[in-house]
């Protein structure tokens, strides 16, 4: 066989100075990595998120269809984000400012309204009081002075979890009552090929918590969308699912590890009708018999259909001792699960409520996600209450996947 003979490749041995140089280089990389980690993980700083609303006047963006085109959206988004960057990089808050993102653009009569999430990092020891005003005043002064385009800053609010704008109206409910607008702004509907399958709970501007069993048929993000608001149709907002992370130890038909997190995009703005709930600490435990609420678009009876209007029901936590009795669920209640409802039945979650929230409020009226609708024998049957995934048990798992 013929073999072409090429130029002689000479092996060059590493010279001692090259070795020293390489060692020095590696050392620098290691030192820099450690420094980076200490800076970002070690120091006691806390991210704070603020929601600003801007108004750009004298701006015509509507096309014939009345919609903002993708091109205009991108252009305005970039302009707004650059403006906010410039303002803070050149302000007294420059050391604390991290970034901003325009999450929505709304076309109005003679202008455009934008919702912007601004991220800052402050030492946890710093007082938070007055920060909102400071951010507002910096923005207000600069947007007035510097731009050719007439701009107003309408509001600045801290992004807070678990607060709702309507008071809780407590009524005893059978198969749930239709929920008031803005009452459960963390509720989401997970839809496969446009059809409601499961509930989910908003825990940040782009993450949801739901049940792992919702993805038994498909965990392909491209088939899934998420909608917000108290009606499935028409939805208040709709988003594409980007990532579905099912608990790696979930094995159907076993019911342990019935938890998943879902990332969607783009982020949702923090409004009265769409906002996230707080996650409890790992250590929190709730007292048996305490009051909790479940919400969902699920069926009103076993074998029924999902509903277009969100419903709510008030339940009581049932202790594990009670729920593990042989005539209730016996040994089917495993770690990371708890029961809620009534042994006499009626008030319960049902098909289509799965993955949705079980929530409770603290003394300051801040709402927390404690449970995820997981399973149960039938719906509303005597001695067969609903069983929920214990969010406190999986709190660290949620953090490990979402960083929240
Ligand atoms: C379901 O099929 C389902 N009664 C969810 C909750 C309960 C029963 C069934 C609890 O999604």
Image: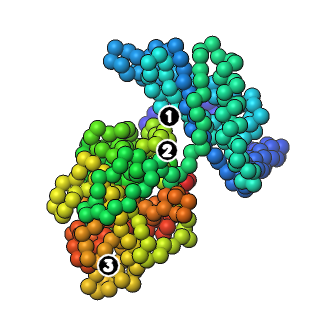
Instruction: Look at the image and tell me in which quarter the C terminus lies.
Output: bottom right
Farthest residue, direction left: 303
Provide residue 8's location: percent of width, then percent of height. 64, 33
Q: Which mark is residue 376?
A: none
Front-most of residues 188 and 43: 188
CA separation, marks 1 and 2?
9 Å
Which labelled disc corresponds to residue 103?
A: 1
For the residues bearing labels 3 and 2, Cβ distance under 8 angstroms: no
Q: Crowding near pointer 3: few (<14 within 10 Å), some, many (20+)? A: some
> Does residue 115 appear left or right of residue 381 in this picture?
right
Res. 242 image quadrant:
top left
Q: CA distance from mark 3 to mark 1?
A: 44 Å
Residue on which the image places disc 3: 332
Q: Position of residue 375 (x, y in %)?
A: 30, 67
* Residue under numbered circle 2: 205
Of the two numbered discs 1 and 2 on the same chain, state the one appearing first in sequence. 1
């Amino acid at each position: 066989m013929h073999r072409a003979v090429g130029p002689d490749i000479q092996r060059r041995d590493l010279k001692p100075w090259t070795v020293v140089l390489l060692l020095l280089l590696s050392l620098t990389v290691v030192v820099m990595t450690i420094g980076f980690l200490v800076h970002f993980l070690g120091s006691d700083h806390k991210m704070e998120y603020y929601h600003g609303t801007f108004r750009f006047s004298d701006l015509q963006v509507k096309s014939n269809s009345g919609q903002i085109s993708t091109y205009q959206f991108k252009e305005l988004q970039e302009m707004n984000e650059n403006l906010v960057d410039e303002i803070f990089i050149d302000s007294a808050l420059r050391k604390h400012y991290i970034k901003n993102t325009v999450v929505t653009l709304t076309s109005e009569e003679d202008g455009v309204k934008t919702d912007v999430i601004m991220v800052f990092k402050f030492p946890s020891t710093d007082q938070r009081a007055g920060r909102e005003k400071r951010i507002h005043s910096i923005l207000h002064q600069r947007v007035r002075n510097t731009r050719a385009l007439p701009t107003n800053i309408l509001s600045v609010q801290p992004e807070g979890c678990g607060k709702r704008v309507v008071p809780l109206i407590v009524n005893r409910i059978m198969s749930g009552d239709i929920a008031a607008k803005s009452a459960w702004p963390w509720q989401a509907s997970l839809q496969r090929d446009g059809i409601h399958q499961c509930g989910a709970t908003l825990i940040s501007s782009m993450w949801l918590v739901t049940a792992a069993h919702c993805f038994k048929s498909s965990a392909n993000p491209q088939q899934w969308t998420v909608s917000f608001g108290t009606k499935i149709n028409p939805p208040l907002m709709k988003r594409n699912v980007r990532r579905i992370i099912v608990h790696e130890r979930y094995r159907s038909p076993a019911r342990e590890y019935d938890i998943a997190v879902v990332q969607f995009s783009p982020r949702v703005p923090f409004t009265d009708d769409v906002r996230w709930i707080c996650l409890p600490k790992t250590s929190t435990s709730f007292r048996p018999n305490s009051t909790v609420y479940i919400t969902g678009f699920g069926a009103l009876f076993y074998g029924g259909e999902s509903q277009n209007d969100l419903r709510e029901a008030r339940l009581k936590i049932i202790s594990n001792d009670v729920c593990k009795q042989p005539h209730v669920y016996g040994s089917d209640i495993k770690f990371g699960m708890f029961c809620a409802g009534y042994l006499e039945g009626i008030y319960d979650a049902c098909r289509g409520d799965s993955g949705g929230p079980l929530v409770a409020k603290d003394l300051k009226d801040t709402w927390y996600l404690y449970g995820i609708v997981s399973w149960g024998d039938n719906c509303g049957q005597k001695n067969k209450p609903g069983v929920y995934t214990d969010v406190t048990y999986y709190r660290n798992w949620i953090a490990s996947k979402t960083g929240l």
